[in-house]
């Protein structure tokens, strides 16, 4: 239900786009005392933020394009995230098999490893090691030995639950007084002179239209990712359409597949070069499954309808089988697919892989709008740095000195140390209701915020019931997602607040338990649940179930 008091206020910062970068700007701005409102047309982290390889990394291959500042920035922020979000970002060991017939010889990988260590001089993870062929084959016996020259190992990090990383930035912003609205689309940007003075929005859940008002110092931040140009296109001046500037976005499509553990599956993440074309891709252990990707294809289609096509799926399967000859992966092995568009700058005549991954803060003053900045680019790894840089630009535009950036040292809301006594205390307190495995699972997923989930169990013991016999997830998590995490659809719950949809069966077998919980504890009507189930199945068919799998028949059976 729309809160009318939102339209009665004015805001220092209006952020359009609730992905990881918009959430980071909101967090930083709110922590530095600015009144903020964040608007997202779908759910938080529902766009590019949700479709990455879930790595927090320096970008080893960016060294080839001499993007040294980007690598250093990313490695610096990797360390900050390992420290400030230890429940969501964990060290990850990566292994590179080096083949003589690929584009990057042994010496080049070795040189890259040395540079990587230099640029991460302040790291807390171990340094790299190189392995000649004999040692590598002893360590990784299932890897193809054809043309193998050896290998390398190094550490980066993984954000297995990237959507929760985004959400905790939103949570931090709202804890500091910010407002965040999902399912709220921007229909008009109102311009007067050289400023945006207000924004007309529509609540996509009930159709309510309202206006968000600015004041003489309000700055509008466009962090809509691949949709940046679409936001600029709805501007009007004196009641007439007046799009802001020219095309800025030219993203590339990246697709992933999820498969269960396979014969010869590695115990570490693998960073490999495709045998067919030399493109690097990852094979990453992820929540008991393996995440394989990504592709990198120029994309100019419908941003709201993106799906891994059969050719991309076959490419990733074939290349994984090439590295692991005993894997035997085929189309039937794929349990989930996803695809997204990287929000890269629009350039003509460049290979997709060579387009810069460095973010750009585009000041629209040169296009006649003095109080708007758009973010072009941006990575999961560097979202905190984007927030810091953007908020510094906001203060500069306001003509005010910027307070020190707090996000370098401020943990996210769920941050918890491994030996925090609250975990052991929770196990003792809830031992008569929940198994130690379930309590530990909740702390692994929510960090310190697990205490809020457990508080629901204290009030309503029936919420301890598991969603299924073979999962540790409990009904309290469904209620918590709706009551405390702005989840408004079943897709929000099973795909973004929880990763259930991606871990086999598309979450379809859990729908009855989810619906029962929503009706009994969240006030959802049977009609709302029926619509939500239909929307969920349609989304899975259109975005996540491979075309060859007869997706519509699967979800409607």
Image: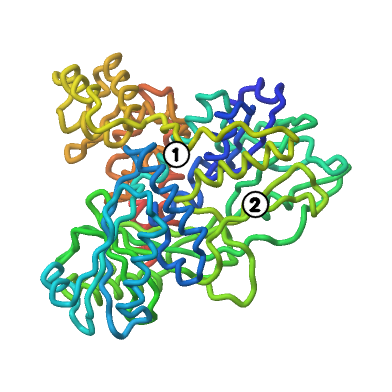
Residue at 31% x, 85% y: name it: 101
Residue at 34% x, 70% y: name it: 316
Residue 54 visible in the picture: no
Q: Which residue is mark 2?
A: 361
Element type at marker 2?
strand
554 to 311, vertically: above or below: above
Residue at 70% x, 61% y: name it: 247
Residue at 29% x, 50% y: name it: 125
Between 440 and 135, the residue placed more toward the observer is: 135
Q: Are marks 2 and 1 in contact (CB under 8 Å)?
A: no
Q: Residues within 10 Å of mark 1 (few under 14, many from 20)?
A: some
For residue 217, what is the image quadrant? top right
Which comes before the other along the chain, label 2 or label 1? 2
Relative horizontal placement of residue 159, taking residue 167 as reference (left or right): left
- Residue 11, image x and y in percent? 69, 28
Q: Which residue is mark 1?
A: 532
Element type at marker 1?
helix
Q: Gap between marks 2 and 1, in whole Å?
A: 38 Å
- Residue 84, image x and y in percent? 39, 37
Relative horizontal placement of residue 49, taking residue 470 as reference (left or right): right
Residue 328 visible in the picture: yes
């Amino acid at each position: 239900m729309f809160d009318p008091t939102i339209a009665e206020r004015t805001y220092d910062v209006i952020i359009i786009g609730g992905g990881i970068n918009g959430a980071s700007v909101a967090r930083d701005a709110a922590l530095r005392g600015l009144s903020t409102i964040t608007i997202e047309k779908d759910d938080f982290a529902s766009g590019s933020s949700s479709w990455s390889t879930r790595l927090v990394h320096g970008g080893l291959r960016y060294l080839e394009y001499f993007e040294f500042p980007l690598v250093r920035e990313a490695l610096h922020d990797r360390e900050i995230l390992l420290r400030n979000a230890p429940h969501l970002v964990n060290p990850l060991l990566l292994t590179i098999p080096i083949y003589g017939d690929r584009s990057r010889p042994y010496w080049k990988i070795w040189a890259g490893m040395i540079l990587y260590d230099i640029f991460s001089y302040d790291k807390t993870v171990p340094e790299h090691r190189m392995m000649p062929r004999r040692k590598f084959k002893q360590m990784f016996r299932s890897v193809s030995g054809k043309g193998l020259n050896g290998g390398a190992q190094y550490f980066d990090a993984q954000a297995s639950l990237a959507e929760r990383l985004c959400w905790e930035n939103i949570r931090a912003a709202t804890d500091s007084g910010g407002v965040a609205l999902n399912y709220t689309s921007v229909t008009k940007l109102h311009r007067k002179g050289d400023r945006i003075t207000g924004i007309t929005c529509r609540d996509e859940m009930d159709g309510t239209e309202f206006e968000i008002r600015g004041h003489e110092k309000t700055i509008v931040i466009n962090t809509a990712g691949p949709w940046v140009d679409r936001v600029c296109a709805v501007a009007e001046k004196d009641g007439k359409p007046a799009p802001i500037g020219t095309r800025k976005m030219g993203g590339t499509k990246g697709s992933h597949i999820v498969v269960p553990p396979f014969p010869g599956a590695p115990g570490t993440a693998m960073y490999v070069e495709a045998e067919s074309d030399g493109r690097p891709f990852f094979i990453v252990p992820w929540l008991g499954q393996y995440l394989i990707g990504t592709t990198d294809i120029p994309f100019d289609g419908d941003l709201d309808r993106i799906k891994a096509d059969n050719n991309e799926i076959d490419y990733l399967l074939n290349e994984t089988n090439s590295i692991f000859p005993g894997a035997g992966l085929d189309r039937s092995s794929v349990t989930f697919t996803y695809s997204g568009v990287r929000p890269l700058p629009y350039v003509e005549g460049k290979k997709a892989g060579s387009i810069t991954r460095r973010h750009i803060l585009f000041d629209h003053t040169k296009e006649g709008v003095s109080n708007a900045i758009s973010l072009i680019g941006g990575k999961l790894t560097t979202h905190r740095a984007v927030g810091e840089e953007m908020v510094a630009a906001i203060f500069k535009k306001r003509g005010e000195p910027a307070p020190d950036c707090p996000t370098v040292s401020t943990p996210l809301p769920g941050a918890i140390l491994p030996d925090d006594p609250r975990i052991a205390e929770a196990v003792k307190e809830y031992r008569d209701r929940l198994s130690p495995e379930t309590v530990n699972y909740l702390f692994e997923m929510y960090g310190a915020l697990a205490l809020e989930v457990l508080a629901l169990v204290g009030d309503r013991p029936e919420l301890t019931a598991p969603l299924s016999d073979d999962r540790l997830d409990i009904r309290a998590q469904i209620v918590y997602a709706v009551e405390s995490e702005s989840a408004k659809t079943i897709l929000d719950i099973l795909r973004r607040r929880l990763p259930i949809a991606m871990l086999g069966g598309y979450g379809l077998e859990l729908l009855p338990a989810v619906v029962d919980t929503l009706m009994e504890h969240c006030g959802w009507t049977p009609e709302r649940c029926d619509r939500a189930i239909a929307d969920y199945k349609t989304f899975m068919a259109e975005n996540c179930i491979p075309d060859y799998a007869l997706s519509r028949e699967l979800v409607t059976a």
